[in-house]
Image (cartoon, rainbow, N blue to C red):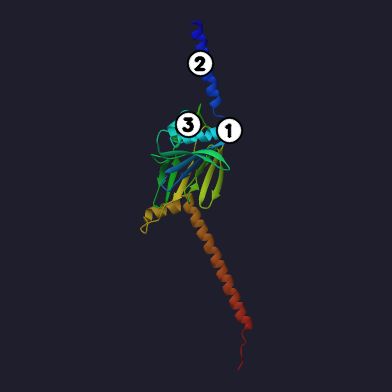
């Protein structure tokens, strides 16, 4: 009985040591989430888990794991529960995962969503308003707050021509690349609400509803701004035209010789 007990202890210890020896040694020093939104509010998402390996042996061990797991998301999630989608985790489509080893080592998880990440709000024939669906970020909701964790960066790339409306919550860095506004949240950051709203100019049909057009011009801030800009342009052109006409008249008067008979 005693021998069996000692044998059991030896086997358990051996199993523990073997598992410990083969355990991975790495850390995720940065987690980036890029959310690229198209003109109808759908999103393509790319998450990168940037990895640090203390030694080349650790990197080799992870490389071997990636060869074994391949692009199977479930195997990677079983290996590390943190390797899961951050956005809309229950309704992802076309999900794939891949390990990249170059100047930077990272595990990339990319996927789409079964439904639009943006809800359409007010709209007319000229502009449409979009609001982000906060419930798609439920994985970031903790004790009544929306939390962007440490070492986490979330980039929301708005469609070309989209203009941000109202304040972004949590507070964010706003940048622009080409025609795209980009909203960036860097952790650690928290807020009691999550809000992203923008307006997008719609493709104008040859047949524009006159009522919609009138309402847009005279009953929205954007329309009134356009009217003000047009009036300023007209005033500048009118002033320049009168000034140029006056110079021409003055030149003609000063350079014309009147012959007396």
* Position in image of residue 204 (x %, y %): 40, 56
* Position in image of residue 136 (x %, y %): 44, 35
Circle 3: element type: helix
- As rendered, which of 201 and 48 lies closer to the eye? 48
Task: State the image quarter where residue 111 is shown.
Answer: top left
Which residue has dot 1 on it?
Answer: 57
Which residue has dot 3 on it?
Answer: 139
Q: Work out how far the residue at label 1 is from the one at label 2, CA to CA, in angstroms.
A: 26 Å
- Badge 1 crowding class, 10 Å Cα cut-off, few under 14, some 14 to 19, many 20 or more, is few
Q: Which mark is residue 11?
A: 2
In this image, 115 relative to 2: left or right?
Answer: left
Q: Earlier in the sequence, mark 1 or mark 2?
A: 2
Q: Earlier in the sequence, mark 1 or mark 3?
A: 1
Tell me if residue 43 comes above or below residue 213 in the rendering: above
Mark whose residue sits in front, 2 or 3: 2
Assess whether mark 3 and mark 1 are in contact (beta carbons under 8 angstroms): no
């Amino acid at each position: 009985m005693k021998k069996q007990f000692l044998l059991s202890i030896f086997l358990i210890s051996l199993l523990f040591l073997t598992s410990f020896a083969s355990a991975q040694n790495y850390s995720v020093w940065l987690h980036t989430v890029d959310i690229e939104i198209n003109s109808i509010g759908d999103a393509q998402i790319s998450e990168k888990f940037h990895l640090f390996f203390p030694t080349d042996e650790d990197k080799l061990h992870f490389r071997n794991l990636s060869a074994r797991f391949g692009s199977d998301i479930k195997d990677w999630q079983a290996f590390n529960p943190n390797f899961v989608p951050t956005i809309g985790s229950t309704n992802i489509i076309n999900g794939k995962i891949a390990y990249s080893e170059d100047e930077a080592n990272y595990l990339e998880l990319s996927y789409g969503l079964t439904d639009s990440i943006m809800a359409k709000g007010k709209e007319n024939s000229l502009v449409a308003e979009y609001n982000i669906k906060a419930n798609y970020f439920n994985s970031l909701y903790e004790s009544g707050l929306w939390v962007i964790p440490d070492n986490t960066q979330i980039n929301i790339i708005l469609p070309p021509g989209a203009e941000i409306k109202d304040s972004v919550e949590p507070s964010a860095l706003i940048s622009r690349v080409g025609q795209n506004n980009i909203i960036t949240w860097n952790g650690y950051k928290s807020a009691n609400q999550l809000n992203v709203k923008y307006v997008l100019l719609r493709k104008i049909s040859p047949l524009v509803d006159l009522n919609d057009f009138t309402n847009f011009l005279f009953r929205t801030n954007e329309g009134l701004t356009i009217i003000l800009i047009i009036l300023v342009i007209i005033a500048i052109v009118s002033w320049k035209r009168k000034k140029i006409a006056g110079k021409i008249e003055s030149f003609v008067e000063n350079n014309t010789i009147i012959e007396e008979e």
